[in-house]
Amino acid sequence: MIFQDRRDAGRRLARLLSSFAGDDDVVVIALPRGGVPVGYEVARALGAPLDAFLVRKLGVPGHDELAMGAIASGGVQVLNRDVVEGLGIPGDVIERVAAHEEAELARREAAYRGSRPPLDVRDRTVILVDDGLATGSSMRAAARALRKLGPRRIVVAVPVAAASTCEELQQDVDAVVCVETPELFRAVGQFYEDFSQTGDEEVSLLLHAAPRPPERGPASDPRR
């Protein structure tokens, strides 16, 4: 299957998620930038609020491609203990790298969300969306970071992914929903007619166009 663009992919993905429609405890969280147009269509079809969840890799100094952890929206930090302990990376190095990435994460969040606070995902079902998965490293980091914010359930939903990646993700989330898992998978973009880059302005426009629920307080949350 070839998707016309990310919006088309989102509409097709939403059909597989129809059982979540109308559930007030469902929120759609998209990974910027490419996941936001997909997530927007999913959120619109399900009548669910949409937000973005940013993840920044913490690269090992001098070997930036090697991740010693990640930081994410909401001040969440996840460390790869095998890498940190195996390489003997001291705490002050982790703090320095994290501070640099936190500044970039904050800049992007301000550009995308403005002054609006992140959605509260506590005790909610989170549908975590991207435009596709190759290795799934960013999605895995996002899921682990998001788990620390207390959602009831995390469902990863993507239009296309490598079959092996979907299997591996099952260890980190409660369910994985994928429209296509082709045998011959080289890159996400091969399954889109239009895979042009999603800009910051489009991300911001879609996030502001999507509905958001009223903020929950202690008095209005029956589970508290």
Image (cartoon, grey):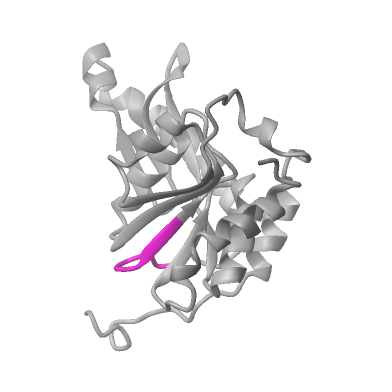
Quadrant in the picture for residue 164: top left
Residue that appears at 78% across and 41% down? 194
Q: How many marks?
A: 0
Please give left or right for residue 79 compared with residue 42 in the image.
left
Quadrant in the picture for residue 215: bottom left
Q: Quadrant of the N terminus?
A: top right
First to last magenta residue range: 120-127
Residue in the foreground of this view, choosing between 203 and 140: 140
Main secondary-structure element of the magenta-colored stretch: loop
- Is 170 inside the magenta-drawn segment? no
Quadrant in the picture for residue 39: bottom right
Compared to residue 147, the image places residue 60 above or below, namely above
Residue 90: x percent and y percent? 26, 20
Residue that appears at 48% across and 81% down? 214
Residue 144: x percent and y percent? 33, 44
Residue that appears at 30% across and 32% down? 79
Please give left or right for residue 93 compared with residue 139 in the image.
left
Please give left or right for residue 6 compared with residue 180 in the image.
right
